[in-house]
Amino acid sequence: MNDPLLSVRDVSVEFKVTTGTWQRPKVLTAVDQVSLELRRGETLGVVGESGCGKSTLARAILGLVPLAGGSVWLDGKSVADQRDKRWWRRDIQIIFQDPLASLNPRMTVGEIIAEPLQTLMPELSRDDTKKRVRSMMERAGLSAGHVNRYPHEFSGGQCQRIGIARALVSEPRVVLCDEPVSALDVSIQAQIVNLLTDLQQEMGLALLFIAHDLAVVRHISRKVMVMYLGRAVEVADADVLYETPTHPYTRALLAAVPVPVPGRVRPETELVHGDVPSPLSPPSGCAFRTRCPKVIDRCSRERPELRRIDATMTACHRAGETDA
Amino acid sequence: MLNYAFKRFLGAWPTLLILIALAFFMIRAAPGGPFDSERHLPPEIEANLRAAYHLDEPLIQQFGRYLVGLTQGDFGPSFQYKDYTVTELIMTGFPVSLRLGGLAMLLAVVVGVSAGSLAALRQNSRTDHAVMSVSMTGISIPNFVMAPLLILLFAVYLGWLPAGGLGNGSAANLVLPVISLALPQIAYISRLTRGSMIEVLRSNFIRTARAKGLPERVVILRHALKPALLPVVSYLGPATAGVITGSVVIEQIFGVPGLGRYFVQGALNRDYTLVMGVVVFFGVLIVVFNLIVDLVYALLDPRVKY
């Protein structure tokens, strides 16, 4: 029970970027040696601003983009070892960000949800497939009578329910949620988050929950990982991370959350300025040093590794200093 | 769906009427007439001829007479091919053009869609560049250059195929004209397919299909092909109408008695009724094929409702 179900070790993803006709393609490191572990029934939140590699990390775990380094293990088995990837898809599924665009507009909802069963469990009879599709739809909060409708006949929230039903119909053990609620209204967001947590308890799912909304992530996750420019900069239990952030970037993120009290303003001190550096030429040493309020010489020479400070894993040379 | 088809059918009549009127008055506005030739006819004979074909009547009356004839399926007599009606001429030329053009379009769709999809699946690879260079060449070389080159190679040097004529209608006689007709279409269709396929492959629902664990073959055939074919289908409607009504150039080069040459000869000879007949026939085909395209759209995309 305490062995991790999914473990990701030093995973890197690189893209070749063509900058001009005659130039050599440059290498963009979208995910840079990220490791994580996920246990049964557990939720790990991943936060960070756009372009920091959150979605790419999820796709790499699923095998939708090739790994440039590192390995992904499920239940002690490495994905790279097996030829037939179907067991992998059956156990790990993904929920995408844009609910409507992620559904094939030319297929009925029933066909969309049945398709994973047809490929991943060809042993199921037609009737069993139909039954499973209907029951999954109802568990996802859809009416089973809507099997023959097309995606465009549904609202955004309902489309995301279809996406959830599609992901869960093969009864996976790990579900990667790639910003599943960021395209939805706040009231619908709550419904979808609650649906996910309900289904998680029902099916004992391990969730990797990617979002840029810090409040949503805190609500759903037990542990949270903060990413910056493709690297994991801080990992801790949700409450620890939100109450006592150790990495300057985490502090900046938390400080940027608007205060829901009119007239009250956060102190400006923690906010960072400037833009994220180009991932094509990341800064030497610590990736955050160009914007960090506490930067020292060492930050440009040495890349900080994740290390334990109290209850937190953090990648900052200055974390744990008494004046921090 | 039937309702929609019927509405479109009704809507086609005004279009055709405008087309007929434009063609009717424009061909008559061109200088010269059907009975001008090098040998001067005595004025009495020419007057008699004009009267026999009702060319002495006011234009508007001639137009009315022509329309009445059309409603009875009568395209009138040809002015140049004595003893033939226009309907007879179209019916001798069209089957030949239809056979050549139909085969050419079939070939163009099969080869063009496959080559275009292949190029899209291997975007920026050597295969892609090769397919696209060949297709660019195919678009750039006009068929009056391509056809003689093909004849030179396969008929004259290699001696594999006949250089021209329909012979007894054997397959060997069809090969070169069909290929010459198909080449530019193949080039165009493969470019269209490649472009839209690349776009479709980048879309989110294709990523979902891959995430479902489907084999790549199923992802392409079941999820990507249909949406990628939409631009090709809308191109195919008018293109097919154009190709099956015959290409003057190809028919002249290969000595094939198709419909295309009647159109050009009719226009040069001021054979009013023949030109009109071919124009109306072509117009009807265009309207019909566009209707077919719209109906096929509904088959390819359930969001299209009529």
Image (cartoon, coloured by chain):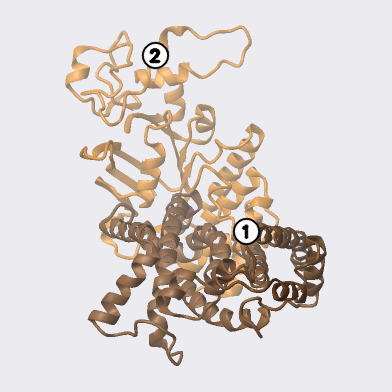
Image quarter hosting the N terminus of chain B: bottom right
Which residue is under mark 1?
Answer: B31
Q: Is residue B49 above or below residue A147?
A: below
Task: Decide: is A190 above or below B292.
Answer: above
Q: Secondary structure at mark 2?
A: loop
Residue B72 horizontal/vertical position (percent): 80, 77
Which label sits on residue A273?
A: 2
In the depicted view, which residue is nearer to us: A156 or B161? B161
* Shade representing chain B: brown
| Chain painted orange | A
What x and y, as percent, mark residue B271?
63, 71
Is residue A15 shown left or right of residue A39?
Answer: left
**Which one is nearer the viewer's eye here, A49 or B268?**
B268
Q: Amino acid at mark 2?
A: His
**Residue at screen point 17% across, 20% down:** A301
Give the chain letter at badge 1: B
**Measuring 63% from the left and 53% from the top, which residue is drawn there?**
A151
